[in-house]
Image (spheres, rainbow, N blue to C red):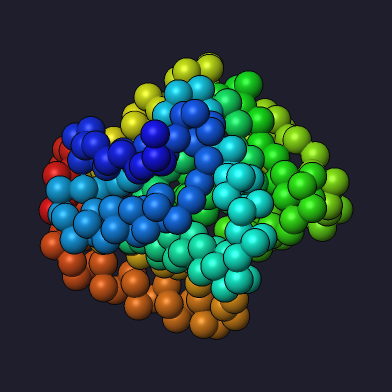
């Protein structure tokens, strides 16, 4: 069966399921294009307030399809370059998507599957899940932004271990390092991700969009620039209808119902 990205609704959360179980949910161009399309649809739909990405069955994703990559060696280099550009478009779409994106990881996230999980705002992982940047194990270098994300968050020596040596790293260690938000029992990642999504769905969407934008800008910003950006977002959100809803509800000790 061909790989596909299944989209379902769970309340105000869109669940995107990597479906290629025969190949452990290996990724490919058809999934990348579908991922961008799904996020565009979710962005324009006010009923969708968050997105969860999961894998079908006991795996999150084995990364790139090695048979496809081997076949691409017989084709012009532009073929693989275009495939990677398509994946990178999906990674950038996740990073700039104004709503929370949560990865629900079971089994393993390898190669581009690991990069995909890292692109999300939150990672919920089964306590026996394994993460591995497997590229160097098959004579390849990283893609999907994995080298950037890891270098932003972990010490250089550990990043070198993960990328150069292709070492497997267990979910509990990534949790200790701060890259995994929550550990759950095997089989519970999706339910835990949906629970987190519902908590986020109850918050003001405009505020979550502002926070995500500020987080994305912070690594490249000077303190002065970041302070100015925080000021502008704060003033805009204060004068948004949800600012009044939130403050009024807090003072009245009520639960806010944001627009």
Q: Is residue 218 visible?
A: no
Q: What x and y, as percent, mark residue 184?
A: 52, 22
Q: Residue at image x 66%, y 51%?
A: 70
Q: What x and y, as percent, mark residue 129?
A: 61, 27
The picture quadrant where one finds residue 173 is top right
Q: What x and y, as percent, mark residue 59?
A: 53, 28
Q: Residue at image x 45%, y 56%?
A: 29
Q: Residue at image x 33%, y 53%?
A: 34
Q: Residue furthest front?
A: 74
- Which one is nearer the viewer's eye here, 123 or 229? 123
Does 168 sit left or right of 35 as displayed? Answer: right
Q: What x and y, as percent, mark residue 137?
A: 79, 45
Does 226 sit left or right of 7 as displayed? Answer: right
97 over 128 or under it: above or below:
below
- Which one is nearer the viewer's eye here, 27 or 257? 27
The picture quadrant where one finds residue 11 is top left
Q: Residue at image x 61%, y 45%?
A: 67
- Which one is nearer the viewer's eye here, 2 or 130? 2
State which quarter of the image contains the N terminus: top left
Give the number of callouts.
0
61 over 157 or under it: above or below:
above
Q: Is residue 122 visible?
A: yes
- Which one is nearer the viewer's eye here, 6 or 175? 6
214 over 29 or under it: above or below:
below
């Amino acid at each position: 069966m061909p790989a596909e990205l299944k989209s379902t609704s769970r309340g105000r959360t869109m669940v995107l399921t990597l479906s290629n179980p025969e190949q452990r949910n290996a990724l490919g161009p058809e999934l990348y294009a579908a991922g961008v399309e799904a996020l565009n649809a979710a962005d324009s739909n006010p009923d969708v307030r968050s997105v969860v990405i999961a894998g079908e069955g006991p795996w999150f994703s084995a990364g790139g399809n090695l048979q496809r990559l081997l076949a691409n060696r017989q084709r012009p280099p532009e073929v693989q370059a275009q495939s990677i550009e398509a994946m990178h478009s999906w990674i950038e779409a996740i990073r700039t998507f104004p709503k929370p994106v949560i990865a629900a990881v079971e089994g393993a996230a390898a190669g581009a599957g690991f990069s995909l999980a890292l692109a999300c705002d939150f990672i919920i992982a089964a306590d026996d899940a394994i993460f591995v940047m497997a590229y160097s194990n098959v004579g390849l270098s990283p893609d999907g932004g994995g080298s950037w994300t890891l270098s932003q968050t972990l010490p250089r020596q550990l990043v070198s271990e993960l990328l150069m040596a292709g070492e497997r790293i267990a979910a509990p260690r990534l949790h200790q390092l701060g890259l995994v938000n929550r550990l759950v029992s095997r089989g519970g990642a999706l339910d835990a991700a949906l629970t987190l999504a519902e908590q986020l769905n109850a918050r003001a969407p405009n505020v979550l969009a502002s926070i995500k934008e500020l987080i994305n800008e912070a690594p490249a910003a000077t303190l002065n620039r970041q302070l100015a950006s925080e000021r502008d977002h704060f003033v805009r959100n204060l004068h948004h209808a949800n600012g009044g809803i939130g403050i009024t509800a807090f003072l009245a000790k009520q639960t806010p119902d944001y627009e």
